Image (tube, rainbow, N blue to C red):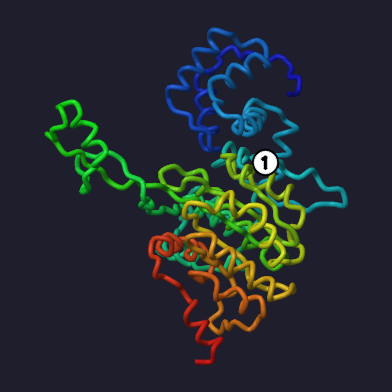
């Protein structure tokens, strides 16, 4: 951390109010801070003192930061709130539109934009000069809120590739709120239960030994439940890059949301090679997680070799992650230039190794879509469901597809089209 100059204490200071506002900014940036932590922070500052900036930094850090991934956000908000003028200018430049010259500023690191938006929430931005009827305070501003809900509904069905920067940001927030629940699997193993429907003969006979072999009570049992794994194979080639970024936001939310039932969520990206990004999805900070995943996947926005990448997955990872009834989400457009025979073989092996294989294809958004490409024709017979994956609404409908084994989407219609019937 950088060295800070001592803080000047004003005569009429409002330390408690400032710490409270600082905690609110951290909460808007995503840190779980409640009133109890704010009170603890105020008491801690009173005990430690307010003379050295470094001591003040670490005192609040001990009160507000509880996870390693929260340190980056805390540092950015601290610099902004407690008056680092140069850094404040840089963060304002991230939020305000500007014309870049030949020499551009450094790119924002993970969580910097979110920290700036949280702290500068409600701050008036510089607006272009023009006629302002309400400058004197007498003008009236008419706001039409009738289209607010319709705008959100339109955004749900809007293609990811057609979204503006502001719409992409709003779509990411909507994806972060989505859930993907799954029903548990009934196994052949059993557990003791007083309300079970089957007699547990082993426990019944063992209990009868305490009474000289006389059975006085029947012990019951019920099947044991188990949660499946979710395995995501996401195409990050040039034709899929915009869709992949938003889909990975959704997968990150699924991996970090409790109570959805998944035993584990495994993530893989592929273009010209296969990359395992599972450990990056465990990071609760979505910005840091996707940035680390993008840095490890060197083939982002490159070519496509679906057949060879699926072969690598089947050889190196299928036995590790596809056991015990895993569900596989395959996100790709199916446009592959490799041998279609190899692609068909690897898709068949993948299909046989998992409980359910769901293929999300953004090309299905077109009404006149037809399986003309060789890669699509080779992959289609080996998936359980074929659905579109181009919008928030299509990802929201995944929950119904997973819970309904009979939902094949457009698979049967396209198979009949391929066969000519």
Judging depth in this view, the residue of 205 and 412 nearest the camera is 205
- Outermost residue toward the right in this view: 102
Judged from the image, the secondary structure of the residue bearing numbered disc 1 is loop
At 73% across and 39% down in the image, what residue appears? 90
Left or right: where does residue 319 sit relative to residue 181? right
Relative to 60, residue 248 above or below: below
- Outermost residue toward the bottom in this view: 421
Numbered marks: total: 1
At 56% across and 79% down in the image, what residue appears? 366
User: Label 1: which residue?
Assistant: 110
Relative to 10, residue 415 above or below: below
Residue 184 in view (yes/no): yes
At 25% across and 36% down in the image, what residue appears? 203
Q: Residue 52: image x %, image y %?
A: 67, 12
Quarter holding the N terminus? top right
Q: Residue 195: image x %, image y %?
A: 19, 43
Left or right: where does residue 312 sit relative to residue 233? right
Residue 145 in view (yes/no): no
Q: Residue 267: image x %, image y %?
A: 60, 51
- Outermost residue toward the front in this view: 212
At 16% across and 31% down in the image, what residue appears? 213
Judging depth in this view, the residue of 188 and 419 nearest the camera is 188
Relative to 345, residue 215 above or below: above
Q: Residues within 10 Å of mark 1 (few under 14, many from 20)?
A: some
Q: Residue 223: image x %, image y %?
A: 31, 47
């Amino acid at each position: 951390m950088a060295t800070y100059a001592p803080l000047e204490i004003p005569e009429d200071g409002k330390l408690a109010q400032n710490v409270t506002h600082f905690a609110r900014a951290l909460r808007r940036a995503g840190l779980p801070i409640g009133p109890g932590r704010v009170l603890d922070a105020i008491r801690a500052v009173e005990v430690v003192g307010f003379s050295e900036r470094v001591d003040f930094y670490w005192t609040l850090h001990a009160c507000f930061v509880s996870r390693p991934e929260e340190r980056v956000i805390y540092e950015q908000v601290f610099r902004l709130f407690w008056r680092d003028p140069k850094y404040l200018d840089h963060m304002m430049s991230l939020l305000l539109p500007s014309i870049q010259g030949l020499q551009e500023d450094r790119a924002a690191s993970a969580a910097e934009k979110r920290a700036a938006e949280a702290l500068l929430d409600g701050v008036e931005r510089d607006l272009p000069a023009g006629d302002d009827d309400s400058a004197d305070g007498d003008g009236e501003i008419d706001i039409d809120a009738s289209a607010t809900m319709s705008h959100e509904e339109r955004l749900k069905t809007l293609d990811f590739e057609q979204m503006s920067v502001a719409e992409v940001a709003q779509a990411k927030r909507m994806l972060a709120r989505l859930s993907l629940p799954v029903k548990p699997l009934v196994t052949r193993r059993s557990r003791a239960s007083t309300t079970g429907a089957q007699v547990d003969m082993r426990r019944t006979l063992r209990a009868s030994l305490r009474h000289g072999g006389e059975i006085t009570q029947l012990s019951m049992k019920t099947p044991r439940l188990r949660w499946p794994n979710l395995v995501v194979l996401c195409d990050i080639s040039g034709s899929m890059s915009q869709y992949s970024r938003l889909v990975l936001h959704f997968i990150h939310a699924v991996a970090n949301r409790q109570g959805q039932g998944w035993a584990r969520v495994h993530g893989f990206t592929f273009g010209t090679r296969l990359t395992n990004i599972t450990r990056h999805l465990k990071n609760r900070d979505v910005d840091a997680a996707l940035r680390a995943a993008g840095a490890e996947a060197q083939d982002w926005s490159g070519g496509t070799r679906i057949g060879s990448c699926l072969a690598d997955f089947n050889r190196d990872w299928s036995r590790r992650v596809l056991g015990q009834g895993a569900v596989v989400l395959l996100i790709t457009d199916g446009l592959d230039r490799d041998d279609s025979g190899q692609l068909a073989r690897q898709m068949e092996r993948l299909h046989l190794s998992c409980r359910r294989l769901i293929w999300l294809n953004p090309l299905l958004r077109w009404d006149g879509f037809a399986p003309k490409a060789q890669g699509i024709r080779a992959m289609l017979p080996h998936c359980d469901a074929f659905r579109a994956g181009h919008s928030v609404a299509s990802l929201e409908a995944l929950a119904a597809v997973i819970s309904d084994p009979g939902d094949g989407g457009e698979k049967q219609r396209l198979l009949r089209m391929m066969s000519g019937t």
